[in-house]
Each structure stands twice: as C-alpha cells, then as structure tokens.
Amino acid sequence: MSDASSHKQILKSTSILGGAQVIEILFRIARSKIVAVLLGPVGVGLIGLYQSTIDLVQSATGLGINFSAVRDIAEAAGANDQMRISRAILILRRWVWFTGLLGMVLTLVFCKPLSRYAFGDDQYAWGIAVLSVVLLLNAVSGGQLALLQGLRRIKMMAQAKVWGVIAGFSITVPLYWLIGVKGIVPAILITAVVSLFLSWFYSRKIPVEPVMIGLTETAKGGFRMIRLGIFMVISGFALTGAMYYIRAFLSQKSGLDGVGQFQAAWNLSGMYLAAVLQAMGTDYFPRLSAVNQDNAQVNKLVNEQTEVALLVAGPLIVAMLSFMNLVVVILYSSEFTDTVCILHWHLAGTFLKVISWPIGFIILAKGRGGVFICSELASIIALVAPIVLFWDSFGIEVAGMAYLFMYFCCLIIVSGIARLLCGFSWSRASIKQIIVFGVLVILAFFASRYISGVNGYLAGGILSLITAGYSYLELRKIVSLKAVFDKLLKR
C-alpha cells in the first residue's frame, strides 16, 4: 500500500468509526438525561451498580480473549491464509462460549455476595442472578465483534454499534417510562439480546471455510489467545486499583470536593480524546498485527498513524487548553475551580499520550504481553508516586502534574521497547508534526495559565485557528476532505 493510500485508509476508518461514536455518545447523553428525569438519582445509581457488577465479573472471566483474538485473526488475514483464519474464528467462537458460561455460572453462584458488595444487602441478588445471562450474551457478542475487527470490516462494526445504541435507546426509555425502576433489569437484558443479534447479523456475512478442530487443539489455540488477553486484564485491574488509591488519597487530603475536582478533570481530558483514539485503534491494531513480522512495515504504519493522530487530536487539545474555563463551567459549574488547574497539566499530558499511543501497540502486535504489563505498571507508578510524594508542595495541582509525568515516562519507556523489538524510529514527517504541535500546545498551555480574561480567550482563539488551519492544510495533502464529508453525510 502506498503512503497516500495508507494515510487515506487511516482517515477513512477514523471517520467511519468516529462518526459512529459521535452518534453513540449523543444517544447515550440523551438516554442518561431521560433516565435521570424518569428514575431520579436512585434509578441512575441502580443502573450504575448493576452495570459495574456485570463489568467486574466480565473483566475477570473474559480473560481478554476478545482483544487478543483480534491479533490472531488479523495476523492470519495478513498472511492471506483462509484455513488459518477459519481455525482462529472457530477457536474464538468456542472460547467465548466457555468464558461466557463461566461468567454466568459464577454470577449465579455468587449473586448474594455480589449484591452485598455492590448494594450493601441481599435485596438485589435476584436481579444479579437474572443478569447473569448477560455475561454469556456479551461474551458471544464480543467475540463476533472481535471477528469483524480482526478482518477489518470497519463499516459493519460501525453499523452494528450505531443500530445497537439506537435499539437500546428505543427499548430502555419506554420500559423506564412504563414501569420505572422495575424496568432496569429487563432493559439491560433485552439490550444485550439486541446487541447479540446485531453482531450475529453482520458477522454471519463473513464466509468461513469448514474446518475440523478437536478439543485439544481448541484448548491449545485458546490458551495462545488468552496469554496476551490475561496481561490486558491484569493491566486493567492495576489501573483500576491505582485510581481507587488516588481517589482515597485525595479524599483523605482534601475531602470529597478534591475527589470531585480530580474526577472532573480526568473525565474532560479523556472524554473527547478517547473517542478519537478508540476510533483509530479499532482499525489500527489489526492492521499492525497483520504485518507484525515485517519490522519495516511496522515502523511505516506507526509513523503514519502518529501523523494522522496528531493532525486530528492536535486542534482539539489546543482548543480545550484555550477555552477550558468555559468548558468546565458549561459542563460542570463555576465551583470546579481546581479542575481547571488540574486540567492544564492533564491536557499537556494528553499530547504526549497521542504520541506514545501508536508506539505502544507495537508491543501488543508483537504478542509481548509480559513486556506490556511491565510498561503499564511502570507508567502507573509514575502516576501515583508524584501525588503521594509532592502533595505537601503542590497540593491538588500535583494530580495534574503526575498525569503529565506519567505520559512522559510512558513515551520514553515504549519508545525504548519499540526500538529493541523492531528498531523503531520516527520519520522526518512525524518529527515535523511532533515539533509543530508541541510548540502550539506549549503556547496554548502558557496562554491559558498566564493570560486572563478577554485577552486570554483572544490569544487562545488565535492559536486554535492557527492549529486548525495547519491541520486542515496538512490533511488536504493526504485526502480530499470534501469528498470524505460528502460520503459521511450521504451515509
């Protein structure tokens, strides 16, 4: 694939999945608002506790196989080996049934302890028992979406997600309106059934060669898949534990108000960027996995992804830095003053995250799970340690500084690992974009901190326009943006 067509593929995938995510976010915001009105805080709390219980069990019993299977399927597709693809698909389908049944049985057996842990008593054990079926439905649905992602059927994935969120909205809102909080358990269950149907509807269109695989080969193939997935699970639990510790530490030092200020900054710094990076990563990871044995192709693809990621995310970071005071007041309130000082550092760290993010996927594409977990643990330590060590010197603002320090360390760590694994180095084009956007982010950072009032917004607005204009001109060299937007509008 030529440089131009590869860049176009990245932008095309990002636009399709990004558009789907925008629709998904809008429907979720609307649903959250309606649910808050219909059910009140109690109903919203019940939904959150039920969902967090399902997520907790699923993360433990799913073994990360839906993520790791993407690599195996993409690698087989990259080799253009249809029988190998079919074997990987069959092994994945058998294992998601196993992990789903495991999660369902464990939830049934421990429904009372889970209810006591989440709700404080056994009153909701019956609801958790009913929702145990969701563990099986989600596992099978997730496996079918992993199949679509591994084979890079991006349009099908986007359609499944969009129709899923629309169907979920159409089902849950009438249920909550008709029967109130009693509709929570049926709504979650029916939504899972709809998601399973949609994932099956699209995945069944993929031709699969008939293959015969015994239980022994299924077990061996599955263990190879979950070897990487388990490291992802460990990493997720480690981050969850670190965030729990940070919130507890902030609660002790500055009360619940401090926890709320930190959480608001964390949400804002990750909310908009998560949609961009997730949209990119959905197609990027299988593409990288498909060529993981060719180091020259790996380096080329990582550099291309870095360029596009900066061109798309750079203007958002600069704009957020420039107008964060307004953003915080609009999305939260004027009481969240400490959120602004934390957010300054978070957004600066986000810029380093965008640079390190494409490189980190090299470790996963190479299947080096142990190396990945070590790099993740080192980054988590780099987040927690400064908060504990320098709280007395900087107060709550150190929570933002630690975020910047974490991604500074992460960038150094993953760059060093990537150099050892595949001789990675940045291309001249990537270095150019890193320097240009680095300068613009630094200027926006200092302007937002040290220029107040109208002059601050004026300086920020000028920097935002310069950044957006530069990105537009650079993206035009890659693809016709008008054609891309016209196609999206038609879809």
Image (tube, rainbow, N blue to C red):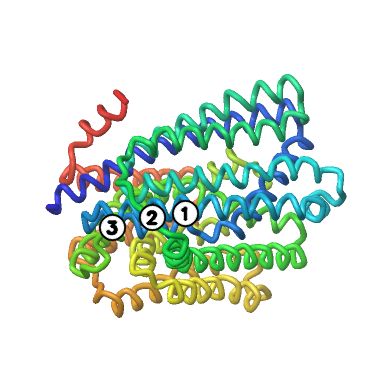
User: How far is disc 1 from disc 2 in space, using C-alphas?
Assistant: 7 Å
Residue under label 1: 66
Residue under label 3: 76
Q: In this view, does 48 lie to the left or right of 87?
A: right
265 or 282, nearer to the observer: 282
For the point 42% across and 64% down, the residue is 217
Residue under label 2: 70
Residue 414, compared with residue 155, is above or below; it is below
Residue 74 visible in the displayed image? yes
Asked if the residue at tag 3 contacts the one at tag 2, i.e. Cβ–Cβ closer than 8 Å, the answer is no
196 or 294, nearer to the observer: 196
Asked if the residue at tag 2 contacts the one at tag 1, i.e. Cβ–Cβ closer than 8 Å, the answer is yes
Mark 2, Cα crowd under 10 Å, few <14 / some 14-19 / many 20+, is many
Mark 3, Cα crowd under 10 Å, few <14 / some 14-19 / many 20+, is many
13 or 304, nearer to the observer: 13
Amino acid at dot 3: Ala
User: How far is disc 2 from disc 3 in space, using C-alphas?
Assistant: 10 Å
